Image (cartoon, rainbow, N blue to C red):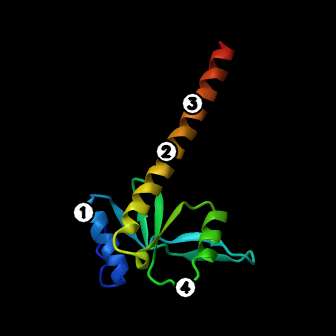
Amino acid sequence: MNDSSSRMTYPEKKVAEYLRKMNIEWVYEQPVFVWDDDGRPRVWTPDFYLIHFGIYLEVCGSEKFDYKYRRKIFDRNGYQVIFLHLYKGPDKWINHLLFYLMLFSDYRTRRINDLLNGTTKKFHNII
């Protein structure tokens, strides 16, 4: 949880404050490597990287900006990014964040269980 608040926008400061309150460790603007639509390499900096979740947050401060392109590029490059639209209403973004943290965590748990179950079956077939 680095102190980068001097570079943060007001919506980013609100998210950082909430993450601190919830004791969620984060890094501000952790660079990621992506390939864009034209196959060019790019380095992007999502607003927050949640260390213990392995998930990025992109704080959407304006409805005028088109976030669909960014979502498409992040998805195509295999990054799990939660887009938080703070302008859509007070504290709606908190429920959105918690819902998607739970969704991603549940997916990972199911995937690991599937891998363990598959490995266990193969192991028993060998013996």
**Proximity of marks 2 and 3: CB atoms separated by less than 8 Å:** no
Q: Nearer the viewer, mark 3 or mark 1?
A: 1
Who comes first in sequence, dot 1 or dot 2?
1
Q: Say what amino acid the circle numbered 1 marks.
A: Lys
The local crowd at label 3, few if under 14, some if 14 to 19, many if 20 or more residues have their Cα within 10 Å, is few
Q: CA distance from mark 1 to mark 4?
A: 28 Å
Q: CA distance from mark 2 to mark 4?
A: 31 Å
The local crowd at label 1, few if under 14, some if 14 to 19, many if 20 or more residues have their Cα within 10 Å, is few
Who comes first in sequence, dot 2 or dot 4?
4
Quadrant for the C terminus in the image: top right
Q: Say what amino acid the circle numbered 4 marks.
A: Phe
Residue for badge 2: 106
Q: Nearer the viewer, mark 4 or mark 3?
A: 4
Q: Position of residue 25 (x, y in %)?
A: 33, 60
Residue for badge 1: 21
The local crowd at label 4, few if under 14, some if 14 to 19, many if 20 or more residues have their Cα within 10 Å, is few
Extreme-left residue of the structure? 21
Q: Position of residue 88 (x, y in %)?
A: 43, 76
Question: Quick check: 126 left or right of 33?
Answer: right
Q: CA distance from mark 1 to mark 2?
A: 23 Å
Query: In the image, which disc is placed on residue 65?
Result: 4
Quadrant housing residue 11? bottom left
Residue for badge 3: 116
Q: Nearer the viewer, mark 1 or mark 4?
A: 4
Who comes first in sequence, dot 4 or dot 3?
4
Q: Say what amino acid the circle numbered 2 marks.
A: Asp
